[in-house]
Amino acid sequence: MATYKEIQDYVKLNNGFMSKSCWIAHMKELCGLNPKMSARRYSPTSRTNPCPLEKQDALRNAFRHFGMI
């Protein structure tokens, strides 16, 4: 499985923006990949920074590139 840094670098190179780690975790959750819970997360049931809809396709493409989905 790719690291968050590898995913961020791939997205920046191919889509021109730097993805936040919380966006990657949210997308992993949506794709059924069971991300680890961050120690800085306030609530296990809610997200303060979910991945914006317009960025989700770029992250899914990165997951496909790395063979995660």
Image (tube, rainbow, N blue to C red):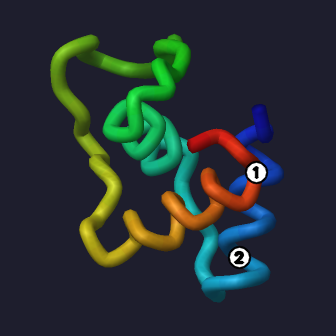
Eyeballing the image, is 56 above or below 3? below
Tag on residue 66? 1
Eyeballing the image, is 5 above or below 40? below
Hey, what amino acid is under mark 2?
A: Lys
Quadrant containing the C terminus is: top right
Q: Is residue 61 left or right of residue 34?
A: right
Q: Please provide percent x and percent y for residue 3.
A: 78, 38
* Identity of the residue drawn at 79% across and 48% down: 5
Q: Is residue 9 left or right of residue 11?
A: right
Please tell me whether mark 2 sits on a helix, a strand or a loop. helix
Marks 1 and 2, how far apart at CA: 15 Å
The earlier-in-sequence mark between 1 and 2 is 2
Q: Please provide percent x and percent y for residue 25.
A: 48, 36
Q: Nearer the viewer, residue 19 or 35?
A: 35
Residue 7 figure quarter: bottom right
Hey, what amino acid is under mark 1?
A: Phe
* Identity of the residue drawn at 72% across and 46% down: 67
Q: Please provide percent x and percent y for residue 36.
A: 54, 15
* Identity of the residue drawn at 51% across and 18% down: 38
Eyeballing the image, is 69 above or below 33? below
How many marks on residues? 2
Which label lies toward us, 1 or 2?
Answer: 1
The residue that mark 2 highlights is 12
Residue 11 figure quarter: bottom right
Please tell me whether mark 1 sits on a helix, a strand or a loop. loop
Local crowd size for mark 2, using a 10 Å CA cut-off: few (<14), some (14–19), many (≥20)? some
Quadrant containing the N terminus is: top right
Tag on residue 31? none
* Identity of the residue drawn at 38% across and 64% down: 56
